[in-house]
Image (spheres, rainbow, N blue to C red):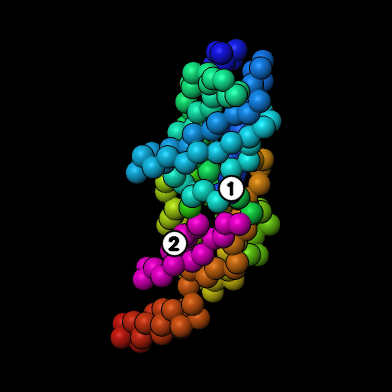
Amino acid sequence: MLLSCRKILSASSVDGSVFLTWSPIFNANRYEIEVTINSSQQKNIYYSNTTSLLIRSIENDAFYDVRVRALNDLSSSDWSLGIIVRPKLRQSLSSVHQIPNEKKGFITLQWILTPTDFGFRVERCDVGDDKGFKRIGWLQFNETRTHEDQTNWYASKRACQGHFYTVSYLDTRWDSGAGVLSKKFFCMSSTDLFEENHDEEFSIQQDI
C-alpha cells in the first residue's frame, strides 16, 4: 500500500500547536504521525482515524520534523516526505517593554520574541506631534528582540511628553498591518530636564 500523495498537504503552526492535513489513502483505516524534535531527535507518535491532526502542547520556537504513513490491519505504507514546522507565539500575546538606557534622549525597546517570516517593523508616535506614527526601524533578522531609538526631544531641550511604539510582526499568517502597542515611554525624565537647565544656568553665570 503506497501513499497516493507522498507529502503532507498543509501544516499550520500557531501558539504551541500545529495542525496537519494530508491526502486520504484507499484501504487505510488509520494514520500514524511521527513528530521528531530536531534539537534532541526525540520522537513522538500520534494516531488519527481522519486525514488531519491537531498536535497541542509543543514548544514555541522549536523545530519539528513531521511525517505520516497510512495503516490498515494487514500492512503500512511508506512514510511521506517530512516537513519542518515551527510553532509561534500568537502576536496578540506579545508585549513591548522599555529597558534601562543611561543615555538621555534614547529609548531601548524589548519585546517578547516569536519567529516571523520577514522580521519586525518598529514605529514611533511622539505625544504632541500631529504626524502620527512613523517608521524608525525595519529589523529583517527575525531573532532580534531589542531596538534602541534616539528621539528628537533631548536635542530640542524640551520636556519629554512621552512616546508610543508599535512593533509589527511581519508574517504570512498575520495581517502585516497589525502591531503590538507599547505603553507611554519617556526618553527624558523631569530630573534630567532640571539638571540640564541648572547646568545651563550655572554656565551662563560663570561666563558673566
Q: List x then y, in percent, for residue 60.
A: 50, 49
Quick one: SS at disc 1? loop
In-image side of 61 versus 135 (left or right): left
Q: Residue at x 43, y 55 (%)?
A: 146
Q: Residue at x 55, y 68 (%)?
A: 185
Q: Residue at x 44, y 67 (%)?
A: 99
Q: Which mark is residue 56?
A: 1
Which residue is more in the foreground, 71 or 181? 71
The amino acid pointed to by label 2 is Thr
* Quadrant in the picture for the C terminus: bottom left
Which residue is more in the foreground, 32 or 65? 32
Quick one: SS at disc 2? strand
User: Which mark is first along the chain, 2 or 1?
Assistant: 1
Residue projecting furthest to the left: 206
Q: List x then y, in percent, for residue 18.
A: 58, 40
Q: Residue at x 60, y 24 (%)?
A: 73
Q: List x then y, in percent, for residue 49.
A: 67, 32
Which residue is more in the foreground, 137 or 18? 18
In the image, which residues are magenta? 93-112
Q: Which mark is residue 108?
A: 2
